Amino acid sequence: MSTTTTAQIRVLIAKPGLDGHDRGAKVVARALRDGGCEVIYTGIRQTPEMIAEAALQEDVDVVGLSILSGAHLELFPRVIAELKKRGVDDVLLFCGGIIPEEDSKALTDLGFSAVFRPGTNTQDIVKFVYEHVKK
Amino acid sequence: MDELVERFLKKDRRALARIISRVENATPEGREYFRALYPHSGKTHIVGVTGGAGSGKSTLTGALAAAYRKREKTVGIVAVDPSSPFTKGAILGDRIRMQDLALDPGVYVRSMAGRGALGGLAPTISEVVSVMDAFGFDIVIIETIGAGQDEVEIAGTAMTTILVNNPGTGDDIQALKAGIIEIADILVVNKADHPGADVLVSQLRALLSLSPAGSRRPPILKTTATKGEGLDELIDAIDEHYEYLKSSGTLAEHRTEDARRQVLSIARQILLERIQQTTPEAELSALVDRIAAREIDPHTAAESITTSVRG
């Protein structure tokens, strides 16, 4: 492999809250890796502050949140607030997991550009990232 | 651009993160930032942590940073993970082992993808480290990609190189071989709570006793990074090595060698870019096909595309 310094899309995949199931997050991280992104994966049980701080330090273009616990309307607004507090206001946001259809509007209003539910083709997520990232 | 530099100099971490991205990607803007900030660098102790995949480098780096924080030192960390040779994508997972530091304002962690560079590093790591140095961290730790026997490049950038070993990973002949073990300034036996740690320590000690008389023998330390054990001793050994570098004049030598390596590496990059600019893709493809068909040899082809830079 030849050396390259080309800018790759940087994505943070994070799991806020207390649920310990990160299979979905890992599958998405792997799909984005295979799609050519540099994916920072921070593991389970992240607080909103930790996620926002990682997004700032890593200067990512995209933040993807995965949640299965049902606490998304509780935790996601706090993640957004922490990002704003740090001036991280230009990242592409998406989320996925067990999220009821009726919560979609609330999440769009918060700034999420897409909600991916179980059964989503991972290629659709990669395509979404490449089409919407602000590079 | 000036606004970002101004914020950087006022220790704004978002400005630091933004500038690192531009420098990492070697954009023209990144080169300007680098030029502006380079004069502010040259004050930090740069420490390298290298060793095999799974040897505990990330956990040790995190524990080391936590121990430095207890001594009220600020720490910047650059952690490198490999890029895919096929898609150029990467999973950067070193932060997972550094969760305790996540919200500490005295610690900044940056993950970098290897992007095909040799030696377990990344193509622009020297520049990124200089930017972190200019930001004013007391210590900058570089954590390499999992290294095998021959990834010695870290010693060019880091002033103090720590080689992480584990019990149960090969007999003493491994340590007798040339390569990575020769660049270690400090040998760490991590996962020291596993069986065989003391045997490994005595094997390493026996081998070091074969070093030429008068040469510096790297200390051998035991750590259990997951429990935070052995870190104070490790910091003392790092500090001691730094003092040795300064008093022996080796630090000045290291800086000169590092400068030489950097300027030649950047010059090589500039020449390569110039050749790529003056060689249309069609011409290059045609040459490549002829080489593959054995009609022309690679040397002759290279000479023909480098006329513009050979004067």
Image (cartoon, rainbow, N blue to C red):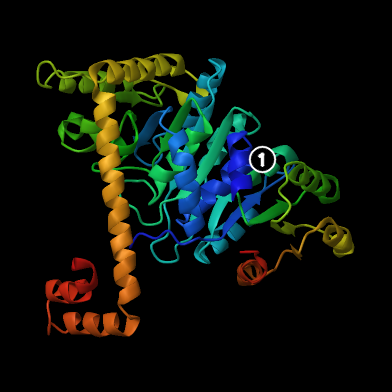
Amino acid type assigned to the residue bearing label 1 in the image: Glu
Local packing at callout 1 (Cα closer than 10 Å; few below 14, some 14-19, many 20+) is: many
Q: Chain of mark 1?
A: A
Q: Report x, y in % for residue A53.
A: 66, 40
Counting the numbered discs, the total is 1
**Residue B163 image-quadrant placement:** top left
Closer to the camera, B74 or B91? B74
**Residue B267 image-quadrant placement:** bottom left
Q: Report x, y in % for residue B66.
A: 54, 23
| Residue drawn at x 18%, y 84% as measured from the top left | B290
Q: Is residue B203 above or below residue B121?
A: above
- Quadrant the C terminus of chain B occupies: bottom left
Q: Is residue B224 above or below residue B85?
A: above
Q: Report x, y in % for residue B247.
A: 27, 15
Q: Is residue B44 left or right of residue B74?
A: left
Residue B198 in view, yes or no: no
| Residue drawn at x 63%, y 54% as measured from the top left | A25
Q: Is residue B171 left or right of residue B237?
A: left
Q: Report x, y in % for residue B295.
A: 12, 85
Q: Is residue B167 left or right of residue B178?
A: right
Helix, strand or loop under label 1: helix
Closer to the camera, A37 or B201? A37
Residue B4 in view, yes or no: yes
Residue position marked by numbered label 1 in the rendering: A53
Closer to the camera, B62 or B206? B62
Q: Is residue B10 above or below residue B227?
A: below
Closer to the camera, B117 or B135? B135
